[in-house]
Image (cartoon, rainbow, N blue to C red):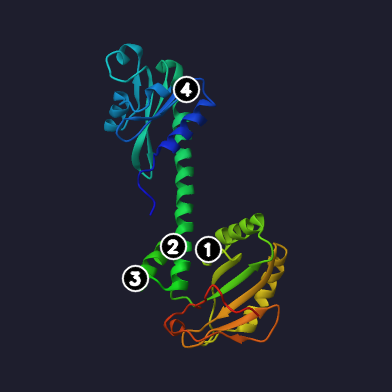
Amino acid sequence: MLRKHYLKGYTARQIVQRAMKIIPYSVNVMDEHGVIIASGEPSRLHQRHEGAILALKENRIVEIDSATANQLKGVRSGINLPISFHEQLIGVVGITGEPEQVRAYAELVKMAAELVIEHMVLIEQRQWDKRYREELINQLILRENSTESLRSMAAYLGIDLAVPRVVLIIELSQPDREALRNVMDYFENHARNHLVTFTEFNELIIIKPITLKEGKWNTRQEMGELQMFKSWAASSGFSRILVGAILPARRDCTVLCSPPGPPRRWRKDKSCAASTFFIMTTRSPRC
């Protein structure tokens, strides 16, 4: 799960670097305890900042002039602004300088800090999402964990396990990172209800939802859609597509081939009867 500690060292350093590119003053970032975790002046790192502590305690902007700074510990003149994310107070961003000189930059720097945090959290969320999707695919294929574990992971991803699905195996004639990235981006942005992963055998595995009509799957319709997908896949460096088919009431697994060929039976697998999902092995027979 995404951690609630949003303001990490790397994120804080990004805030300092970006802010100091647009203003001629040193910038500090303090965590939720008022400790400096990033600064334009590295010698100040890991010091407790009393101005930041006050800003956190009272949730307000704290301005400190030179006279006041001399009476406080670890403090220089400047402005300290509390920063929030999802209505949670997570730290403070400070600009070093006389308040009347840096005041004009205060809200700009705060806004920049919160945008950086939002961006970094989004990246982390996507990374966790990718890991969970890959793990869910592995569990569905290998059936290593309990049904409750599958349901929990699927719920996190917003995936309905009750929906019938099939597996597409797409072979790469030659590994092409750019083509693979384009495919992954496509499913990430336009087909979130598909589960996608890439194997060490240069195969792209897609667990795809299907629609049943009167309890039956129209494989001809699916093959028609597959031909359209095949045309797109061929231009992206893929050589062959295999489609696995299973219905909830059936006890065998069938593979349909593309390019066209007669359907082949795989060995019967007891797990087929227990799952809506097609069960495959990494060394499956080829058409």
Number of marks in the image?
Answer: 4
Residue 159 seen:
no
Q: Which mark is residue 238?
A: none
Tag 3 near tag 1, CB within 8 Å: no
Front in this rendered view, residue 101 or 127: 127
Front in this rendered view, residue 114 or 47: 47
Chain-order first, disc 2 or disc 4:
4
Name the residue that disc number 2 marks.
157
Where is residue 126 shown, x and y percent of the image?
Answer: 48, 53
Between circles 2 and 4, the one closer to the viewer is 2
* Label 3 element class: helix
The alpha-carbon separation of the residues under discs 2 and 3 comes to 14 Å
Where is residue 90 shown, x and y percent of the image?
Answer: 35, 38
Front in this rendered view, residue 221 or 131: 131
The alpha-carbon separation of the residues under discs 2 and 4 comes to 43 Å
| Residue count near mark 1 (Cα–Cα under 10 Å), binned few <14, some 14–19, many ≥20 | few
Q: Which mark is residue 192?
A: 1
Where is residue 89 shown, x and y percent of the image?
Answer: 33, 38
Residue 4 position (above or below residue 207): above
* Label 2 element class: helix
Q: Amino acid at mark 2?
A: Leu
Q: Amino acid at mark 1?
A: Arg
* Label 4 element class: helix
Chain-order first, disc 4 or disc 3:
4
Q: Residue at x 64, y 83 (%)?
A: 220
Name the residue that disc number 4 marks.
104
